[in-house]
Amino acid sequence: MPKPLTSVAEHQATVSGLVGLMPVRATPIAECLGLVLAEDLVAPIPLPPFDNSAMDGYAVRAADVVAVPVVLPVAQDIPAGKTDVAPLEAGTAHRIMTGAPLPAGSDAVVQVEHTDGGTDLVELRFSVPAGTNVRRAADDVALGATVLRAGRVLGPAQLALAGALGFGELPVRRRPRVLVLSTGSELVGPGEPLLPGQIYESNGLMLAAGVREAGGEAELLRFVPDDVEAFHAAIEPHLADVDLVLTSGGVSAGAYEVVKDAFTGRGVEFLKVAMQPGGPQGAGRYQGVAVATLPGNPVSAQVSFEVFVRPALLASMGFAVVERRSARARISTSITSPAGRTQFRRGAYDAESGEVVTPVGGPGSHLLSALAIANCLIEVPEATTELAAGDLVTIRYLD
Ligand code: AMP
Ligand code: MG
């Protein structure tokens, strides 16, 4: 009796559970782009921190510029950054720049365009109600306000806010570290001649790039031969430093399945998932480290990464949303799909031509060129065996 197939959802949960949550670290703010805030951020100062001018102009008492034009002596110059600003005496003006602290005693700023721009004496040509061109302390952020909630993804604007509040570090979950291994004695590197039977390695590049794109750190070993001893020798020195060992190749039904041979009986379980491509999978813990083994065919490896590994990496960093954006689209041609398996076809989706998705490259899992022009995966449910042109399908955007 063959083992029953494991569902896609079940294997997703297994891989995510193995990777788990990364620890929270106080991280230099410049390294936090794209990471997830792990705790609420509370303002340690108000913003702005002090009353300041919204314009280049003259700080005055509104009461001194009711009848205009009026000429006042300029008592002080206040550039931005001046920290010892003298109070404003009645009947005088201070020349002030945008962002500079408003002197005590002043309650309005006349913008420079409404004056003659004088430096000893200034003619003020328009009256200003109190408060004009003044940015009050705390009018943006109150002291003690919660400005960002835990779970917020840190983009440029969130980093700017945290920086303006004086944070040098932020509490974020660290990036997962992934050891990416390509197995296969047929694999050679760029610049090497291609002997008959050899191919240039590509999965490792793809998977390491996928790890980095998801926010993780990748250590890449591209040429691990189909030899159990060599495989162990390759991974052993890295085990202490990584959160996940991610392999490709060597897990199907043939002989010389190095990953299977190296991990069987050592904490990693090999199984068949009800999907196509990417049926043969393995997952577990080897010497305490999470392991996910992906099949070697490039399309299978890519789809497996998308479906199992990427969501696990995102979840480990604290992302609440780990799935790709999805949408419904009409398929441009008829396709078939095996019963009892979720099929993932590569698709080219074009919103401009009316929300139509075109399968590219057919179901073959060695078709790398189609993968490179696809911008989505078409997800055909287990129970669906045929789709006609014009039928609605679910797509997952890859970009
Ligand atoms: P395997 O799962 O090891 O039997 O590999 C299945 C197919 O994928 C074979 O045609 C391999 O040559 C190919 N393959 C495996 N690993 C890689 C890789 N890292 N880069 C490109 N092709 C690969
Ligand atoms: Mg192989």
Image: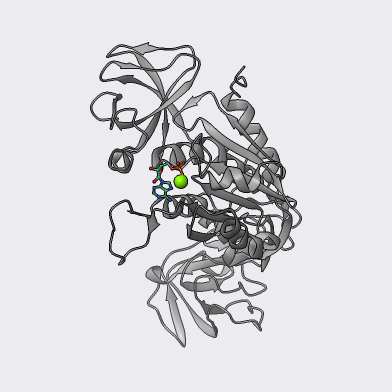
| Residue 264, picture quadrant | top right
Residue 388 image point, x, y percent:
30, 11
| 305 or 377: nearer the viewer | 305
Residue 130 seen: no
Tally of marks: 0
Determine the residue positioned at 66% across, 61% down: 236
- The answer to whether residue 222 is left or right of residue 30 is left
| 48 or 319: nearer the viewer | 319
Residue 115 seen: yes
Residue 173 image point, x, y percent:
68, 54
Task: Quadrant for the C terminus, please.
Answer: top left
Determine the residue positioned at 33% across, 64% down: 190
Residue 193 image point, x, y percent:
28, 64
| Depicted 316 relative to depicted 128: above or below | above
| 184 or 171: nearer the viewer | 184
Task: Quadrant for the N terminus, please.
Answer: top right
| Residue 26, picture quadrant | bottom right
Determine the residue positioned at 49% across, 25% down: 275
- The answer to whether residue 35 is left or right of residue 350 is right
| Residue 391, picture quadrant | top left
Name the residue furthest left.
Answer: 353
Residue 158 image point, x, y percent:
58, 55
